[in-house]
Image: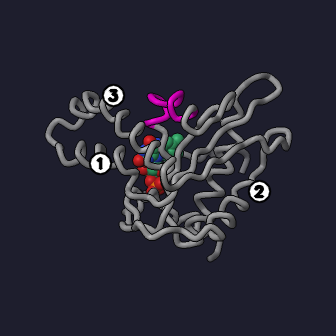
Amino acid sequence: MELSKVIKERRSVRRFKTEPVPKNVLEKILNLAIWAPSAMNRQDWYFVVIQGEKKEAFLKISASAFEHFKPILEKNFKDKPKIIEGMKVFFETYGAAPVIIMAYAGKLPTGQDDVWSVSLAVQNLMLAACEAGLGTVWTDGVVFIKEKEINELMEIKDRKLVCIIPMGYPAEEPKTPPRREGRIQWVGF
Ligand SMILES: Cc1cc2nc3c(=O)[nH]c(=O)nc-3n(C[C@H](O)[C@H](O)[C@H](O)COP(=O)(O)O)c2cc1C
């Protein structure tokens, strides 16, 4: 697929077929992710790709995180219980994705978490997945509430968990959100 087509056609997918993704397909996607540019070429990102028991254990943590968001959602979506229920189900199942990927940042020499480099690698990953006919979505709500527990489960120390990406064959065709106007300024043209 042409790059411009992939860029435009990638959508955030939140419902997946349970059909497993072959390991060689996952490897190809992850190997494209790590071709992103990185600060000082440190390539200091780290991906943990999970399925099976680890995924089920993560889903338990994620489901428990929903309790934190429930009152906020109830306030903001007063007349929309279906939206709240949909989010609850997503926290519990991650859309039935067969694979979930944890994206971790490394550290810069300044001691800062290098959230930027891993974010670029995640965009590569999402585009490569789209090209392979797979859906993904960047999620981070659960990270804000349960990062410590998730890192313990993943046995990761001293890295910032930046986002969690479910991946699988899409079971929905999300609408394309239109682009907002006025976000580009041209100077000197
Ligand atoms: C930094 C960031 C955080 C996001 N967090 C979430 C999230 O926690 N849950 C979720 O379902 N989608 C999340 N998204 C996906 C956005 O909702 C999605 O990209 C946006 O609605 C545009 O849709 P599109 O990706 O199909 O173009 C996030 C995206 C970004 C870039």
Depth order, front residue of 70/36: 70
Q: Is residue 95 above or below residue 63?
A: below
Query: What is the number of the mark on residue 68?
Result: 3
Q: Is 51 on the left or on the right of 106, as rendered? A: left
- Secondary structure under tag 1 reads helix
Residue 139 screen position, x and y as percent: 48, 44
- C-alpha span from label 1 to label 2: 34 Å
- Sequence-first disc among 3 and 1: 3
Q: Are marks 3 and 2 in contact (CB under 8 Å)?
A: no
- At label 2, the amino acid type is Trp
- C-alpha span from label 3 to label 1: 14 Å
Which residue is label 1 attached to?
89
Query: What is the number of the mark on residue 49?
Result: none
- Label 1 crowd bin: few (<14), some (14–19), many (20+), radius 10 Å: some
Report whether the residue tagged 1 is closer than 8 Å to ligand 1: no
Query: Which callout, 3 or 2, points to the residue nearer the camera?
Result: 3
- Label 3 crowd bin: few (<14), some (14–19), many (20+), radius 10 Å: few
Instruction: Specify the segment rendered in magenta.
Output: 141-151
- Secondary structure under tag 2 reads loop
Q: Residue at x 41, y 44 (%)?
A: 59
Report whether the residue tagged 3 is closer than 8 Å to ligand 1: no
Task: Decide whether residue 165 is among the magenta residues.
Answer: no
- Sequence-first disc among 3 and 2: 2
Which residue is label 2 attached to?
35
- At label 1, the amino acid type is Val
